[in-house]
Image (cartoon, coloured by chain):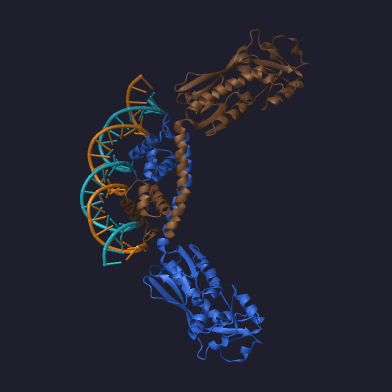
Chain colours: A brown, B blue, C orange, D cyan
DNA sequence: ATGTGCATATGAATGTCCTTCATGAAGTTA
DNA sequence: TAACTTCATGAAGGACATTCATATGCACAT
């Protein structure tokens, strides 16, 4: 048997208009075409779709079944086609985000809240578990945007700057290092360092300071949540290094001090990595604009 | 845009097998055909369905949407086709029944109970409100079987005898007419007659006795349920004429008597009217067999 | 790098089958 | 019965999906 959408549409049209000729008219075809068409299905399927005794063609029992199927199926195809046309018109699309930077949840959530209001037809998601290998995932179209602070020169991939931040040292107010104006790599010897649970290469404190200086803290404790890190720091269970804007969030406990790392300070830049095809899409550009605005707000604290 | 089932099947096959060539093999087509096919949709819809960067062709975001649609839609068509093949093989079908004879519910329900077990794929229903015009409805395929006691010589319509019954007079035990052995038309003068709420032409008592004899009862009261009719008769609120097998049902109140109508008695025959095409269908024949069996049980009381 | 093998793309030809045109048959209404 | 409407049919034409043959592109190994 060889049912096609055309047949479903025909059945529905004939039923709706109550006649072959009117249905044909509606579908911009000849009455003859429809007659041949239904004859074709009836022959192949071996069922009578219409009652031919009386002249305004009526659906038989089997025809009713087919009509029911048509009314279930056709809207689904229509939805798919609508989705595609939304895709090409740029109103719809997918925006699955991978973030290497662990603290970025803090800043990304409010951005996405705004974004979803503006682009309701874009399928937004944050894909966890891609912290490493995020850029290959971007190329494979597993994700559509990667927030990263390590731009690479990859083909078909654009890195758009989002904002600059400074990783700062955080410790309890009563911590001995609170006495220093500036924290150097050597100061970490003997300390318990609290970090996010990711590879060292992805942590600013290691990649930018400790690893080059070949300094190893006494212990490294990995903690998932920013709030918990600050809690531990405030109760003097260790020290941490966090982006300045994270620490500036007033909602956290305040029994800690912050100090710059090295006399010159360390400045890092966060980028949005996207596939070149996508970079110019309206909703993509809008997201990046929103992200920058939010970053400015965070910098103000 | 011009999405067809073939495209949905292709998307699904490529995804399932993870490759064009393998998918083509599965669908008994060439790899080239599939390549042309997806190119066709992509061109028409203006969306990329696959990521072509990596070699084992992978679905893009839009492709995933289409796959989701395919997995929703294809089973529905498959179900429809299965239904059709059930229809031609005779296992499935529709059996909507119209009954002119009002008392027949009593006998039909147990029949249908049995029938549904034997033919689970047949769509069984009793269509009320077709008591008149049932035979035209049969021709129009609004219903598939009519239980009638008035066979007509219609084209394309078969009347299969089901069973014979005798309309009998029913009255309260203390009713004056209980004294008579046989009830004649004239006896109804001055009586209150309780009938089903249908046209007189469809009531045996009128068509077979009172109308030819030009006798009019004092009053006619219409009551829907057989049990209620017998209740009213037992409490001497009127007399009734019912099929013998209905009265023989022991489950009803017993303070009434039954008497034959006329010395010869009246015998009526019930028929199953079906369209000639349907008469030979296995499930139709089975229903009629079941109906006859049930009638025999009822006659025994 | 260069080659080998696998996976997909492409172009022209072919054949299928859907649609149309023209007309006939059947049912409906007056 | 005539006139009209609605559907069916056969032949012809055309659109388009599939095939064959071949090219292009990517991946992995030497």
Who is closer to the viewer here, B203 or A181?
B203
Q: Is residue A110 visible?
A: yes
C3 versus A180 height, above or below: below
Q: Can residue A243 be seen in this view?
A: no
- Residue placed furthest toward the right: A174
Q: Residue C24: x percent and y percent?
A: 24, 60
In this image, A203 relative to A176: left or right? left
In this image, B70 relative to D23: left or right? right
Q: Residue at x 40, y 47 (%)?
A: A5
Q: Residue B44: x percent and y percent?
A: 38, 36
A289 versus D9 height, above or below: above
A106 versus B286 height, above or below: above
A161 versus A62 height, above or below: above
Q: Residue B228: x percent and y percent?
A: 63, 75
Counting every numbered tag in the picture gives 0
Who is closer to the viewer here, B117 or B271?
B271
Who is closer to the viewer here, B110 or A54?
A54
Residue A81 placement: quadrant? top left
Q: Residue A250: x percent and y percent?
A: 71, 21
Query: From the image, which quarter does the C terminus of chain B lie in?
Result: bottom right
Query: From the image, which quarter does the N terminus of chain B lie in?
Result: top left
In this image, B175 relative to C2: left or right? right
Who is closer to the viewer here, B241 or B299?
B241
Q: Which residue is drawn at 62% across and 12% down?
A: A266
């Amino acid at each position: 048997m060889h049912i096609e959408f055309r047949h479903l549409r025909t059945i529905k049209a004939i039923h709706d208009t109550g006649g072959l000729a009117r249905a044909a008219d509606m579908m911009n075809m000849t009455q003859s075409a429809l007659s041949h068409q239904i004859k074709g299905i009836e022959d192949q399927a071996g069922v009578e779709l219409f009652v031919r005794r009386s002249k305004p063609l009526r659906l038989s029992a089997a025809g009713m079944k087919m009509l029911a199927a048509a009314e279930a199926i056709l809207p689904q195809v229509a939805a798919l086609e609508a989705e595609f046309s939304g895709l090409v018109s740029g109103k719809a699309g997918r925006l699955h985000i991978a973030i290497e930077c662990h603290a970025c949840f803090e800043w990304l959530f409010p951005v996405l809240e705004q974004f979803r209001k503006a682009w309701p037809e874009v399928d937004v998601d944050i894909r966890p578990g891609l912290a490493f290998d995020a850029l290959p995932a971007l190329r494979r179209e597993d994700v559509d945007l990667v927030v990263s602070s390590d731009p690479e020169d990859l083909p078909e991939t654009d890195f758009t700057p989002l904002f600059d931040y400074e990783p700062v040292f955080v410790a309890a107010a009563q911590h001995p290092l609170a006495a220093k104006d500036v924290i150097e790599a050597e100061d970490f010897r003997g300390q318990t360092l609290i970090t996010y649970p990711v590879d060292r290469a992805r942590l600013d404190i290691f990649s930018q300071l400790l690893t080059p200086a070949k300094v190893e803290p006494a212990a490294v404790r990995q903690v998932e949540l920013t709030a918990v890190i600050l809690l531990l720091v405030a109760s003097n269970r260790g020290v941490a290094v966090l982006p300045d804007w994270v620490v500036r969030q007033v909602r956290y406990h305040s029994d800690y001090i912050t100090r710059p790392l090295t006399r010159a300070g360390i400045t890092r830049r966060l980028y949005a990595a996207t596939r070149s095809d996508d970079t110019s899409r309206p909703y993509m550009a809008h997201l990046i604009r929103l992200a920058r605005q939010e970053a400015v707000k965070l910098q103000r604290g």
